[in-house]
Image (cartoon, rainbow, N blue to C red):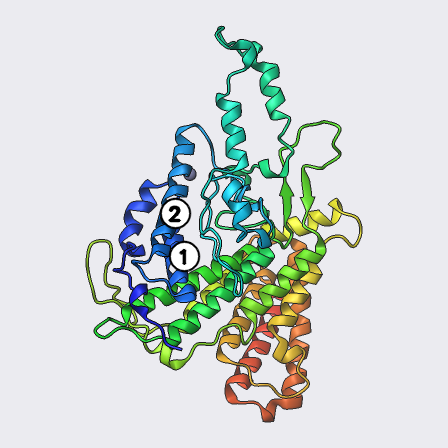
Amino acid sequence: GSFDKTSLLPDSSLPTFHSQLQISAAELCYGAESTEQVAMGALALSLLQNSKPNSETMKEYVHQYLRSLIAHEVGHTLGLRHNFHGSTMLAPEELNNTEITHSKGLAGSVMDYLPVNIAPQGVKQGDYFSRVVGPYDEWAIEYGYKKSADVAGELITPEGEKSFLEEIALASPQPELSYATDEDIRDINPLANVWDMSSDALVYSQWQMDNARVMWQRLDEGDLPRGESYSSLRILFNRVLKYYFRNASLLSQYIGGQSFRRLHANNDTSWAFVQVPVLKQRQALAKLQEYVFAEDAFSFSPQLLNQLAPSRWQHWGSSILNSRLDYPIHDRILSFQSAILRSLLDSDRLNRLQDVELKTEAGQALSMPELFDTLQTGIWKEVLAQKEPKTISSIRRSLQREHLNILLEMVLNTTDELEDGRTLAWYELRQLQKAIDTKLKQFGAALDIYTVAHLEFSSDRITKALNAQFLSR
Ligand SMILES: [Zn+2]
């Protein structure tokens, strides 16, 4: 299937990401990512729905974006702060139901940083951005601006208004009015994030990563119009890659995650903090293995990779990169994998996981050993699970090396590590070394040199690190 890529080009009706970056990062509350999201949505419209830049659909799309962006900024001028919980109002299945979204929007609040809503494969596209302000926005404005009938015409005093305002505030526990502002999102909370969507990020992120995969496929299959530079393709490829990993990183919020609500004492027995159910945490880990760490998570044709040319057009807002010219595919994939893996094993998260064990009933927490073991089993699958000799691909070798680096850093205490994390890293490394040595003895002769060298070197590094640690004690 070929399609017309004319509609994807950066100089079509939408401004390019690069030319916007310099202004938006400094001057807009939304920052550069908003521009990236709207460009991503336009790309999805072209690739997934074959909309042309001058079509009615694209015009409507741009209007929806501008309307929601302006509503957000006007919200600030009216005194509203960000509400990053807003995006959790609807279930994933409701997002493309326009009967719902035309009356109450896609989110509880336009004061969230909302990504473009892209329908999953096989579902009719609904609204891309909220057409109306959300229930939280209406409620907050009512609290701030509505006049009490009792005091109409009289001088308004705080005392005179108190009971009237308290009456409005009573609605606060309603889920549609959920609230989390800037200082509430510096935490592992899958419900309070920027650029997430729906009450179930597990489902939504997976939909979007699947969409990204289809978009890569279309970029591979389509033909650029005559005379067009291949550098356009590189920009689009990178845009999809970034979108993919932004969605993947939302999943990591589930591991050791908890929700936080600003509750006040009343008859309700809800807690301010609620841990993410352990089942959900396991599902998120499994999705990360499948979409980020697995051997078949990324597969691009040589045809596509060899067309990702750098831009040679120097203009305002876009400089020419004087670095490697061809596309550094291994580096690009590893940098994203590494960011997610390091975040999963970072000391803040490990501290949280340990605390959660005391804050939940037995068996209701994801334990640190389970996290370490699940990651190791998935990442070193070729060594730990394979019954036959299995060549380890270059992308997997670099991921395994990075996993090893992280565990070695923990054991050698080069980072500010939780002692239990350090001990578990030591335990996992010993298990891994045994498995590697067994595998080499068993299948060494049947493996290629890349794999043998990688495994022997890994085993040697573990030996040296464990010995170094004994010396240091
Ligand atoms: Zn804002």
Q: Residue at x 37, y 58 (%)?
A: 42
Residue wearing tag 1: 41
Residue 337 appears in the rendering: no
Q: Which mark is residue 65?
A: 2
Q: Real-space Cα distance between discs 1 and 2? A: 10 Å
**Residue 14 percent location from the top left of the image:** 30, 55
Residue type at mark 2 is Tyr
Horizontal side, residue 277 vs residue 40: left or right: right
Classify the position of ligand 1 by quadrant: top left, top right, bottom left or bottom right: top left
Give the side of residue 49 with respect to residue 175, left or right. Answer: left
Q: Is residue 269 left or right of residue 38?
A: right
User: What x and y, as percent, mark residue 337?
Assistant: 50, 65
Which of 418/362 is in front?
Answer: 362
> How far across and down, in percent of the image, does residue 235 sit?
33, 64
| Figure check: 304 above or below 169 | below
Residue 466: give its label: none
- Precedes in sequence: disc 1 or disc 2: 1
Residue sitting farthest toward the top: 154
Q: Badges 1 and 2: C-beta atoms under 8 Å apart?
A: yes
Front position in the image: 467 or 420: 420
- Does residue 406 appear anywhere in the picture? yes
Callout 2: SS: helix
Task: Report x, y in % for residue 304.
Answer: 37, 77
* Figure check: 133 above or below 284: above
